[in-house]
Image (cartoon, helix red, strand yellow):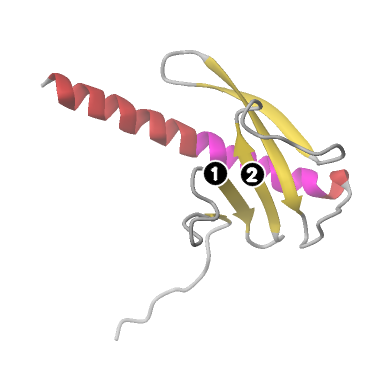
Amino acid sequence: MKNNDLALPPVVELAGLMGETDGRMILMHVRSLTCVEVGAPSDLKLKPGVITRRFEFKNFLGIMEPIVMAVHFCHGDPFPDADECEPFLDVLQEYYIKFAHEQDRNVQNEALGALN
């Protein structure tokens, strides 16, 4: 049997959990146990007081897309202090933007393939 490095990546996507997360983008920063839900502001219905981060990224058409990350928990705490979450939100935002650009590349490649 091959000896594998079983280290986890810094960020994981939580998907396919018995249908509970279908259609949702949920990310977790593994080492800090910080979990966020990511989506368009119009898609996330948030209760008052939820820690959020709003940002934009430029898609492959050059359009700026507004995004919101809502914190489910930070350090495993469902009622964290916003300041303690900030460094992990930076990492999660960077991950999401890379993910979104990869999705854009996939769409472009499929469109180009359909033209050939």
| Other-residue count near label 2 (Cα within 10 Å), few / some / many at <14 / 14–19 / ≥20 | some
**Label 2 secondary element:** strand
Splitting the image into 4 quarters, where does residue 109 fall? top left
Q: Identify the amino acid type marked 1.
A: Arg
Q: Which residues are magenta?
A: 85-98
Question: Is 73 situated left or right of 103 in this image?
Answer: right
Q: Nearer the viewer, residue 85 or 71?
A: 71
Residue on which the image places disc 2: 37
Look at the image and say whether residue 97 sits in the magenta stretch.
Answer: yes
Magenta-highlighted stretch: main secondary structure? helix
Q: Could you tell me residue 32's position as x and y percent?
A: 72, 60
Query: Magenta stretch: residue 88 in it?
Result: yes
Q: Nearer the viewer, mark 2 or mark 1?
A: 1
Tags 2 and 1 in contact by the CB under 8 Å rule?
yes
Residue beneath the point at 37% across and 81% down = 3
User: Residue furthest toward the left?
Assistant: 116
At label 2, the amino acid type is: Glu
